Amino acid sequence: MRPATLLRLALAGTRTDTARVVLTALSALLATVVGLAALTVSAIEKPAGDAWEQSEQYRNALLREPGLRGGTAFALLMLMIPVLALAGQCARLGAPARDRRLAALRLAGATPGQVTRLVVLETGVAALLGTLVGVGVYLVGRDLLHRPDAQGQLALPTDVLPSPGALAGVVLALPVVAALATALMLRTVTTSPLGVSRKAPRERGPGPWAGLLIGFGVASFAVIRPVVYRFADDEELMAWLVPVLFAVGALAAMIGVVIGTGWLSYHCGRLLRRHARGPAALLAAGRLMADPWAGSRTFAALLAALIFGGGAAAQRAYFGTKDQLEREQSRFAGLDGGTDPFYLSTMNYVDGAIAVAILIATGGLIVALVEGIVARRRAYAALVATGVPRATLSRSVAWQALAPAVPAILLALTVGTLLGRGLAEEEVSGGGGMATICEATVALCEDPATSAQYNRIVHIPEVQRAVPVPLEHLAWLGAGALAAVLVTIGVGLLFLRASTALDELRTT
């Protein structure tokens, strides 16, 4: 098959195929913009001077201080996780219609390798279009946002650009990764002239091995502080050991939570089948046990965002407790002040990024649920034809989404909180010293001849306070995630009525 013919067939299809290509390109666009933003932060050059010399052309300390730019770039890269998960969900949209089209191509004489290359090329071309548009959006936005203030300082690093190699790497890497991921997903698919078949899923439920990954991730975060204290003088070791512990621990915990959702889905199905009495819950139980990994695929991006949200909530609780303690001791000594609000204000940016990630993950949830309903429309139509009310099917879809979502959300928030508390100390201490207070006017206090007679020494007692668990913040995160799931169910039910029309029984 000639390359031109292969490309023309890859871009052909129905409106569903067009929607899949557009959504995949949109996901690649978002991932490109986020990736280029992270590379731009990393491209900021350190000014001449010592290691603590700051880039004064920026207003935000996250960009100004060299030691904080690496964490900022890493946080931006973490935003790519829900975007890439959204791309994976979009690639599954309209899979049954695509399978019938591939079977027709096999019937026309195409080989299995050719139809596989066709699907891989479709995803790769869509991702390439998205990355090219994303580069254009990034460059245009860079010019529009380049607005120095009266002091000549910038809100964003619009005065630097990533290297040409980095730009080319983003443009080429995302389509390649998308194409390889598609090829990986198709490894169990066999396309024949009679249709598309997949390997049957295993009958027994997933094992609880995800707990080992979660435990390893939590342990990796727990040893970071002892490692820092133990090897503080070895700068070369610290330069790579702490980032490796952080990255490996976060990745292990995230994979463990996502895989653990499959275990939760299976056992939620078992509990529903054992104790439920209504037909809607029994239908949902059967679906959860038949495909427990559907929950892992569906909620992966949302759970990743919640893990980081739980960790950020634990860090905010630590900084908030420290700030509150120092303010109380300052008031006790008759002084006015507290800690530098930089850390708490930085956590506001982190919370904003997590909110964006949850919003993107909600889009992936909607795509996944709608795709699942459309893919099983013949089964739903057959149930309606045998007398099952559509209201029962609607409740079944709600059960199927909510039953694994609630424990998975609690698990993700718990793991995220444990990771965050592993990085911060469990107690905050302050005081234990003396402060000199001048009880007079500013002029008398600043005059060396008169200040001594108005000075008073105040002993500040040493106080230790435990860092509380941020239950309120975690409750808000959990409520937001549950609201996202409910919105997803509402949107999915809008497609359920059209998918249960009796005409669907005649589709092939």
Image (cartoon, helix red, strand yellow):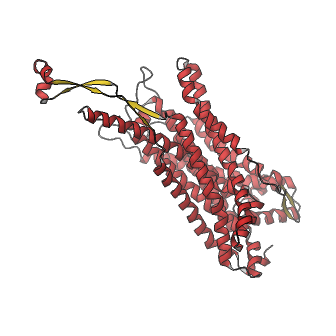
Q: Nearer the viewer, residue 244 or 170?
A: 244
Screen quadrant of the C terminus: bottom right
Q: Nearer the viewer, residue 7 or 390?
A: 390
Q: Is residue 346 above or below residue 481?
A: above
Query: Residue 85, percent across and down?
Result: 64, 51
Asked whether residue 210 is in view, the answer is yes
Query: Residue 413, percent across and down?
Result: 56, 48
Q: Residue at x 70, y 40 (%)?
A: 212
Horizontal relation, residue 43 to residue 278: left or right:
left
Query: Residue 401, percent across and down?
Result: 64, 63
Q: Residue at x 78, y 75 (%)?
A: 507
Q: Is residue 265 above or below residue 490?
A: above
Asked whether residue 364 is in view, the answer is no
Query: Residue 234, percent across and down?
Result: 56, 17
Horizontal relation, residue 228 to residue 462: left or right:
right
Q: Residue at x 52, y 47 (%)?
A: 309
Q: Residue at x 34, y 25 (%)?
A: 432
Q: Nearer the viewer, residue 470 or 344?
A: 470
Q: Nearer the viewer, residue 95 or 288?
A: 288
Screen quadrant of the N terminus: bottom right
Number of numbered discs on residues:
0
Horizontal relation, residue 63 to residue 18: left or right:
left
Q: Is residue 22 above or below residue 182?
A: below
